[in-house]
């Protein structure tokens, strides 16, 4: 009997099937330290099958209201009853149901979850943290095989990493080779010609955060220093996580504050809904679904500056997130994701190239990074951000998601891996991300210059919010529109110099005219993009 199913009797195994893509392995440098207390209480998120959206939101006129979405895409009541019987049989409890997302959050003991899903949860020690983990697949009864699409949260390892970097004077490469410039976010918007004098008071940006927090008084101080009225900031707790500053600007606080200060200052008057969630695959999915289907705050753009290489995810988790992003398209919500900060390898030391997820989802607007030198509304130079393998823009070709139709005419490169796969190209767009030409931010009492594609996601979220306000409607799933604009060459600054090479895979991807796997279509001319989308 293998370790994946040894907790089950032979009779039970005959009626079980594994969930495709649920296989987990032990994290590198982690070691098993013993079993988890069988009486410990925990929570797990189950994603249930439901009708697939036929309209992926490519036409703003067809966006569904929250009520229409639930009425059209709810889980079949008969299938829901089968799931409820399974839950009762295994002494689990339904804590929360998201009808729109098709998810259930279950609570119970470790022993009950082990038995219910055919796993053996163990404690693991990693040099940086401890986690509850599993190896192998997740199992469900045969009769639920066409009902349950994913089971997340059994393993609670930290799943995502923030995509920001702080410029340090000791960074000898940056000091020697880059112009040491920095900008306030409003100065960045001037360089990129964002539309001005637009009232965003009816708009809301959702921001996903997986740790850390911000200080309200510090927010007031920062926005006051820019001459901007502080935006209304609403904290939304997901799975018990809350705004909890650590006092460390180099940690999660840096991500939270960067996102808020950039998004809030490039679209003055906007409301910000910050969804704090645990840094697990389940926490991330629940945060996305909470934001997409939030009928109270109603964000029309969501900014995500956290991610990880595709190879670090289970396939079931990526498909679950991608389904949530499809939901966003149907209800008219744009998802902006950072494409990563560690070059073509995305920080994975295996000799291959990787793209970052969730940026690689075809329903996300993937945001890459540039090195920007400009003043006022004049750009002196803009090239691919690359300060070395661990400080350069992510980008490449997905090993998971196929080339979407709307990218078919963009001449997307094949993967630089030996298989030369043809898949979803990352990123779609770009913006200033080099810490050496970064954003002036106030966090935990420290004035610092931040970079990373973490800054580009809220920058684009702010631009799209300005556009939504001017159009009087959300653009929603904007990718097909961007790739098919007849005036595309006018609305994007084509970045033709540089690469996102990694020492692990030298010069994997080069910038060139047109779309490329470093900066996508390029950086924006905000006014021209607004005018083009009006048409």
Image: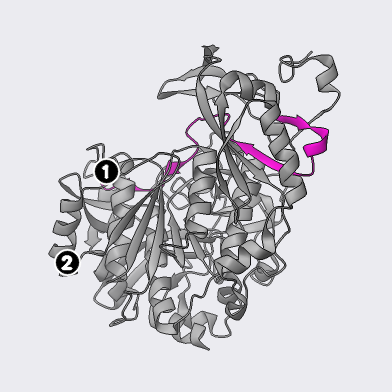
Furthest residue to the bottom?
535
Measured as percent of width and height from the top left, residue 445 is found at: 15, 45
Q: Which residues are magenta?
A: 138-167
Image coords of residue 285 (percent x, y): 54, 46
Q: Residue at x 56, y 62 (%)?
A: 328
Rendered-image quadrant of the N terminus: top right
**Which of 422 and 62 lies nearest the eye of the viewer?**
62
Magenta-drawn stretch contains 152: yes
Q: Are circles 2 and 1 on residues that touch, CB within 8 Å?
A: no
Residue at x 31%, y 81% (from the top left corner) = 198
Residue found at x 37% / y 58%: 273
Residue designated by label 2: 226
Secondary structure of residue under mark 1 = helix
Of all residues, the one furthest to the top in this rendering is 34
Can you tell which mark lies on residue 212?
A: none
Note whether residue 359 is visible: yes
């Amino acid at each position: 009997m293998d370790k994946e199913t040894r907790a089950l009797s032979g009779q039970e195994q005959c009626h079980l099937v594994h969930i495709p893509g649920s296989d987990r392995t032990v994290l590198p440098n982690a070691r098993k330290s013993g079993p988890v207390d069988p009486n410990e209480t925990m929570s797990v998120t189950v994603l249930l099958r439901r009708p697939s959206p036929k309209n992926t939101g490519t036409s703003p006129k067809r966006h569904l209201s929250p009520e229409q979405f639930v009425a059209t895409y709810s889980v079949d009541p008969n299938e829901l009853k089968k799931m409820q019987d399974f839950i009762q049989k295994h002494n689990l409890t339904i804590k929360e149901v998201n009808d729109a997302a098709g998810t259930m959050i279950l609570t119970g003991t470790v022993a009950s979850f082990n038995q219910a899903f055919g796993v053996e949860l163990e404690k693991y020690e990693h040099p940086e943290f401890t986690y509850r983990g599993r190896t192998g697949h997740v199992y469900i009864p045969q009769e639920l095989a066409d009902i349950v699409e994913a089971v997340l949260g059994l393993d609670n390892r930290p799943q995502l990493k923030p995509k920001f970097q702080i410029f340090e004077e000791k960074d000898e490469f940056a000091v020697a080779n880059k112009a040491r410039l920095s900008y306030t976010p409003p100065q960045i918007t001037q360089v990129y010609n964002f539309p001005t004098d637009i009232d965003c008071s009816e708009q809301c940006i959702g921001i996903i955060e997986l740790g850390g927090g911000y200080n309200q008084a510090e927010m007031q101080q920062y926005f006051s220093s820019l001459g901007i009225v502080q935006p209304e900031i609403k904290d939304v707790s997901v799975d018990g996580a809350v705004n909890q500053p650590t006092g460390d600007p180099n940690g999660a606080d840096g991500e939270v504050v960067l996102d808020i200060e950039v998004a809030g200052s490039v679209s003055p008057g906007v409301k910000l809904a910050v969804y704090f969630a645990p840094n697990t695959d389940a926490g991330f999915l629940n945060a996305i679904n909470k934001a997409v289907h939030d009928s109270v705050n109603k964000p029309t753009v969501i900014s995500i500056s956290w991610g990880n290489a595709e190879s670090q995810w289970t396939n079931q988790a990526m498909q679950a997130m991608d389904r949530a992003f499809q939901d966003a398209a149907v209800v008219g919500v744009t998802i902006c994701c950072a494409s990563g900060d560690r070059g073509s390898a995305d920080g994975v030391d295996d000799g291959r190239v990787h793209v970052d997820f969730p940026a690689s989802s075809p329903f996300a607007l993937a945001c890459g990074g540039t090195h920007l030198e400009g003043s006022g509304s004049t750009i002196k130079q803009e090239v691919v951000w690359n300060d070395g393998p661990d400080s350069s823009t992510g980008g490449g070709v997905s090993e998971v998601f196929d080339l979407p139709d709307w990218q078919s005419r963009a001449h997307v490169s094949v993967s630089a891996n030996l298989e030369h796969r043809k898949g979803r190209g990352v990123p779609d767009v770009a913006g200033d991300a080099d810490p050496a030409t970064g954003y002036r931010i106030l966090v935990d009492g420290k004035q610092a210059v931040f970079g990373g594609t973490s800054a580009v996601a809220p920058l684009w979220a702010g631009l799209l919010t300005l556009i939504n306000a001017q159009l009087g409607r959300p653009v929603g799933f904007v990718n097909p529109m961007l790739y098919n604009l007849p005036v595309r060459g006018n609305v994007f600054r084509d970045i033709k110099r540089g690469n996102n090479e990694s020492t692990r895979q030298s010069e994997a991807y080069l910038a060139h005219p047109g779309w490329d796997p470093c900066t996508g279509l390029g950086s924006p001319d905000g006014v021209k993009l607004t005018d083009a989308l009006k048409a």
